[in-house]
Amino acid sequence: MQQRCRIRTVVLAATWFGMVGSLPAQDQLIQKDQVEQFNRIKFSFVSKELVGAEPGAAANFELAARYYVSRVTYDAAPRDPKAMLAVVKDFEDMVSVATSPLNFANSRAPVARLAPLLVARFKEVFALDWKSNQMAQVNAAVLLWHAAKLKNEEIADYLAVVVADPKMHDAVRAYAAKGLAEYMPVNPFTRLDLNQGLKTKQLEERKARELKRVDALLAFIDRPEPPEDVKRKMSEYEINALRYVRRAATTTLAQAATPALSAFDKSGKVEGPVALALIKVLAKKVWPEPQIHERIEAAIGVCQFNKYIEEYDPKIGLYLVADCFADLLNEYKKDHGSGAVKGKGKVPPLLPWKQLSRRIEIALAELTNNHRGTAHAGTVQSIELRMRPMLRSMASGDAIDQELAYRKFAASLRPPANYKTIFRNSAGPLLQVDWEPSVSVDDAN
């Protein structure tokens, strides 16, 4: 059953998010003469105007934005996979030129001219009716993901708007969430900034922008659980789709590298509490219940928290990270026993164990470094030292035999049930969370 669920999730993702089309778009936002007109200047625009070699006319930038975005609605593209792939590749190639090491610095000004025009065209596409334009909109979402690589603040601001908009289809919001990873990690706003007199208008604007991005991801991850009658009507495909899109947001948020954007506000408010969302994912306190893939992303994110938000209390997070790794070891052991790890079984492995083990090893090294000299230094060193040999066995596809001892160690880190604080200051708790992990049917068995 577990393996069938894995396959269904993959099929669902390919169907829902693939760059293919089977439904004709009823709306067309670009005309044939506009496509032909830009094709005549395309080489010059990309090789000269986009990289700052020539100033470029405003009309060329307007036409470029329409060509690169609105073409998802053009002619046969929404129902022709090859045509749509060409649209996406054109956009990706344009971004690659602008962001190449050779051109990046000189392309900043042209990109700043192009970005608001691209955003305007994206808004037009997403304003269309979803039912008759869904393939155009999903492929525009793919373009959003590529547009994020332009590293432009206006594009990042728009991605946050998309992620935060509950009226947008989840397929579109998921790609926007993935795009926000280009703007991670965020810069925490600390007491040091204030003490050094750095509370300037520019700093406040930066904080406000990053807070909107973080808050959008937080809301997407921790959405209200639907009523029981609604859940009963949902198919396994629909539930796995919700997991799939939320995982995109969790993976991006995990790259924030800070437990919060700020936690020393005079009102006692924690702003952008990244740790809250990742802890809820680790503790299975979001619906639908996260699978091990998403929990591991959250665990790596907690490991990468820097030490600049002094108000963060890591005790709960450390326990949940250790507990998640114990579950991961159990999944590896099952995969190893089935022959999936070295390709000898009839089923694919649950996770890319070699790459994942290396990612976790790096994350644990960061965790140890960030807690050096703190009250939790011994705990994190124990986690790293116990995990390291098993991670290396995992990387080489060998069996592990210390997972039971490790689970017992992880259980010893469990805070008391009434310990709920994840942020505190000298006056007491600032933010608390119901972290007691939910027990799934699989866990119970």
Image (cartoon, grey):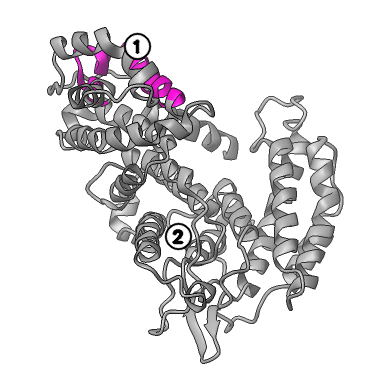
Instruction: Give above or below for 26 relative to 325.
Output: above
Q: Which element type, helix, strand or loop, lies under badge 2?
A: loop
Residues packed near mark 1 inside 10 Å, few (<14), some (14 to 19) or many (20 plus) = few
Question: Which residues lie in the magenta part?
Answer: 69-97
Magenta stretch: includes residue 211:
no
Residue at position x 63%, y 57% in the image: 304
**Quarter that holds the C terminus:** bottom right
Q: Position of residue 16 (x, y in %)?
A: 36, 31
23, 304: nearer the viewer: 304
Name the side, left or right, on which 242 lies relative to 4.
left
Q: Position of residue 419 (x, y in %)?
A: 59, 82
34, 196: nearer the viewer: 196
- Quarter location, residue 403: bottom right
Q: Position of residue 283 (x, y in %)?
A: 55, 64
Between the residue at mark 2 and the residue at mark 1, the CA separation in whole angstroms equals 49 Å
Q: Which residue is mark 2?
A: 286
Dots 2 and 1: beta carbons under 8 Å? no
- Quarter location, residue 392: top right
Residue at position x 19%, y 18% in the image: 24
Q: Which residue is mark 1?
A: 43
Q: Which element type, helix, strand or loop, lies under badge 1?
A: helix
Please state which amino acid type lies under the numbered disc 2: Val
